[in-house]
Image (cartoon, grey):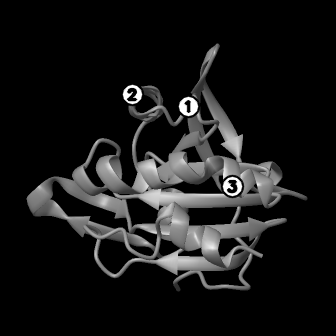
Amino acid sequence: MTIAKGDRLPTADLVRLGADGVETVDLGAHLKGRNVVIFAVPGAFTPTCHSAHMPSFIRTAAEFRAKGVDEIICLSVNDPFVMKAWGDSTGAADAGITLLGDPQSTFTKAIGLDFDAPGAGLNARSRRYAMQVIDGTVTLLHLEESPGTCDISGGEALLAELA
């Protein structure tokens, strides 16, 4: 089943690199009572993710916050070390974007948004999307048809429809 507008996100443990090493983030607890934007990419440092998707949220971060968004989260099926390096190299960390890894693709599979592209070395990766989640419920979902495009899932497109 693919997640849809109006659905509650499943519980999941994601990871990030903190000051004391790898930290587990209980997504359900993290989202409770909050207005959050989550965008997912097939892979850190991959072409469209690096040159279009992440920059669109860096450009719009202040506008999201002005509209009441508590946090912007970038999710990828990568380990926390790669996500930290990507956040530092793109300026996402400086822009206040939280980068979380789903290294086993557990959350991604649970919401039905996983795909394989073995020719590119991408297995059990996340489809490209952006969503608004209020108190754990999906209120907006922009899902790309192709992993190489960033038309409807970019920061500007989601911002234009934000509640």
Residue designated by label 1:
93
Q: Work out which residue is located at the far left of the displayed protein and give it.
A: 119
Seen at 16% across and 53% down, the residue is: 121
Front-most of 66 and 97? Answer: 66
Between marks 3 and 1, how big is the CA–CA gap? 16 Å
Q: In which quarter of the image is residue 139?
A: bottom right
Query: Which amino acid does the dot numbered 1 rest on?
Result: Ala
**Is 153 located above or below residue 55 in the figure?**
below
Answer with mark 3 or mark 1, whichever residue precedes in sequence.
3
Q: In which quarter of the image is residue 97?
A: top right
Seen at 65% across and 55% down, the residue is: 12
Q: Where is residue 135 in the image (x, y as percent from the top left)?
A: 84, 65
Residue designated by label 2:
89
Front-most of 41 and 157? Answer: 157
Q: Which circle marks residue 101 in the picture?
A: none
Query: Which amino acid does the dot numbered 3 rest on?
Result: Glu
**Is 107 located above or below residue 13 in the figure?**
below
Front-most of 78 and 151? Answer: 151
Query: Which amino acid does the dot numbered 2 rest on?
Result: Ser
Foreground label between 3 and 2: 3
Q: Is residue 160 left or right of residue 125?
A: right
Q: Quadrant of the C terminus?
A: bottom right
Q: Residues within 10 Å of mark 1 (few under 14, many from 20)?
A: some
Q: Which circle marks residue 63 in the picture?
A: 3
Q: How crowded is mark 3: few (under 14 residues within 10 Å), some or many (20 or more)?
A: some
Q: Is residue 110 visible?
A: no
Answer with mark 3 or mark 2, whichever residue precedes in sequence.
3
Q: Residues within 10 Å of mark 2 (few under 14, many from 20)?
A: few
Seen at 59% across and 78% down, the residue is: 141
Between marks 1 and 2, how big is the CA–CA gap? 9 Å
**Is 120 located above or below residue 158 in the figure?**
above
SS label for mark 3: helix
